[in-house]
Image: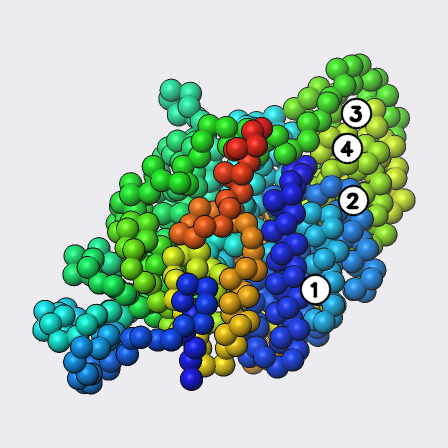
Amino acid sequence: MSALLRGHQIATDDYVALADDESGSEGSRVIVSLARWLEQGEALAGRFDQVGVRLPNTVELSTIWAGLASRPLIELDFPAFADGRAYSQARLLRDRYGFSGEIRASGMAVVRDQMQSMARAGIDSFVLRADQDANSCLAALRDFNLAYQPAADRLPIVSALRRSAGP
Amino acid sequence: MYKYDSYDQKLVDERVAQYRDQTQRFLAGQIPDDEFRALRLRNGLYIQRFAPMLRVSIPYGLLASRQLRMLGHIAREYDKGFGHFTTRQNIQYNWPQLERVPDILADLASVQMHAIQTSGNCIRNITSDHLAGVARDELVDPRPYCELTRQWATFHPEFNWLPRKFKIAFSATTSDRAATKVHDIGVHIIRNDKGELGYAIYVGGGLGRMPMIAHRIRDFLPELDLLSYLEAVLRIYNRLGRRDNIHRARIKVLVKETGPAKFTEMVEAEWALIRDGDLRLQPGDIDIIKSHFDEHPYESDAAADTSFDAMLKSDSGFASFVRRNVHLHRADGYRVVFVSLKPLGGVAGDASAEQLDVLADLADRYSFGEARVTHDQNIVLAEVRQKDVYALWQALCEHGLATPNIGLLTDLICCPGLDYCSLANAGSIGVSQDIADRFESLDYLYDIGDIKIKMSGCMNGCGHHSVGHIGILGVDKHGEEWYQVTLGGSAENDASLGDRTGPAISRANIAEAVERIISVYMEQRQSEDESFLRCYRRIGMPPFKARIYAEPEVTA
């Protein structure tokens, strides 16, 4: 059973991931595929309490953003341990589109050793891969306490620290 | 030398702790092999033919004496007493134990060094001109810009899992000594018509099995926009670079398949949306980075020395050394001294622990405590008073470091090949030694003059064979080692890829083939001033081809 981390703690998942042929129970919170959302958005929004959308990591956000802007949750897919495309999607969602809902990571790369990079990119909930220890993954969010690059998290940025110290 | 502040140090220390934990979890069976592989690669550790290989980062090739001593210590303590300098200005150790690598990294961190992102599909070490800061033809010192880029690239959260490795090189001169046009991104620091500092950006160069010269995608990028533009290129690549085929995954393939014009358009569109964001540099940022570098106070009367010229006249051995291994420095009275790591019968780029210690001492005594690694796998002591060059040469002679062959045929680039590397198809070290044996006479080597032979043991092209004036590529034919030869490559401003001579040549005949190529050049050149490369470009392949494959046949 995969654990969910959200807001730096172990959380209970209040969403149910629906396969495209699953109907789900009315009034619940669900996550559906992008294709299904684009096809049945209005009906889904009427039937469920909340509807999150799962994106393929190949989708070009600019083409679909209009349909996503009001969603409470976007799930990003990491289909392989070393496939980093969804990192760019997360950053674009936060930095370019100003998405303030939950960005959830799921898939093969949601492991201790990628947690902090995901958090830096703007991901704030994690469906841990089944073999992962939740407490170890939480600790990994603090592996580094500084960063060189501005990103979507709140780590102190080295260049800003240096600027405030003066040359 | 760039000196860490507490922030740089903390990040490197935290990385050591992270990797120590990863190693322990791997040894406890908690990380699958293929995933640990990706993690250890990002800390420089390969598993090689006989043992792990650790690649240590030397940002833009610059080393302090205490770092050289630490490299010597690591060679003695964790390896078999030597290290191997690479074509990307790094150093590799061929015999470390996986369990002890966290300790090596901790030792490195104690002297402001690391092995971060020296391998894996991420942004690699930033390389530059080995004469940065001392070259007479330099616009500005590129190293602060390299360091800014290094910091941006280090642990970049978005770009640690790219389709493939990513290499960036900087040049700030008219004669590109950093092979920038065969990098994923080449940055040329330039001034525009208005005298403003900025960059020309080249993207999509590369060696390996599909060598390509980079396309210039921007003629002038303003100085403060460097990082946002790099971010735009990397973001396009991370999203759209191919991941279905490892041989099509470099950015050069994306540029080629998209078309350079369309690719440029995509980068520009992305950049337009982020150029005014957090990555835009503030005017003081570059000064802050510059303030981390040492100032070297030059003596104003250094040029008054007369001993240098006197020794040149009286000692012919010294004169030979100066002729090949000593270059002018931008400050009068100073010289740039090349230390050859290509002794006759030696392995290109290898340095023993003792030699590393000697170099550290000599750097302290004669060159402001600094040394540089060149992408030709030699060492440079770049800031030597001319009056000290003679004493320095004598010390180098004592330790087998004074071979006067810089830029000559025996100063060839060579990967570790089949002797060490698990990817190689063929040996390269032995071949380089065979070639050197045929050109033992220094007088003949001087007569041949400037020539770059570059050799790789496989298609991955670590030895940069595609851009060698003479390129040699090891190939496997039914379990035998054969060699594909190319002529006319160059990695400099006139960058070009070499042309194949014809069928591959056997191990037994490859040195003979090189000798025949040289003999054609010596007969055909118009004067001593016509270099091999110019001669080849004038007369073309046919005369070379005719001789290489003439009877008695060399292809066996």
Q: Quadrant of the C terminus of chain B?
A: bottom right
Q: Chain of mark 4?
A: B
What residue is shown at x 51% (from left), y 70% (from top)? A137
* CB-based contact (under 8 Å), mark 2 and mark 1: no
* CB-based contact (under 8 Å), mark 3 and mark 2: no
Whichever of callouts 4 and 1 sits on the residue coming sooner in the sequence is: 1
Whichever of callouts 3 and 1 sits on the residue coming sooner in the sequence is: 1
- The residue under label 4 is B367
Residue A32 percent across, percent down from the top left:
22, 74
Local secondary structure at mark 3: helix
Image mark for residue B66: 2
Whichever of callouts 3 and 4 sits on the residue coming sooner in the sequence is: 4
| Crowd tier of the residue under label 1, counting other residues whose Cα lies within 10 Å: few below 14, some 14–19, many 20 or above | many
| Crowd tier of the residue under label 4, counting other residues whose Cα lies within 10 Å: few below 14, some 14–19, many 20 or above | many
User: Left or right: where does residue A126 sit relative to residue B34?
Assistant: left
Q: Is residue A144 above or below residue B536?
A: below
Residue B72 percent across, percent down from the top left:
80, 53
Q: Amino acid at mark 1?
A: Pro
Image mark for residue B102: 1
Whichever of callouts 3 and 2 sits on the residue coming sooner in the sequence is: 2
Residue B128 percent across, percent down from the top left:
57, 41
Mark 4–mark 1 distance (CA, rounded to whole Å): 32 Å
Looking at the image, which is closer to me, B361 or B553? B361
* CB-based contact (under 8 Å), mark 3 and mark 4: no
User: Left or right: where does residue B485 sit relative to residue B97?
Assistant: left
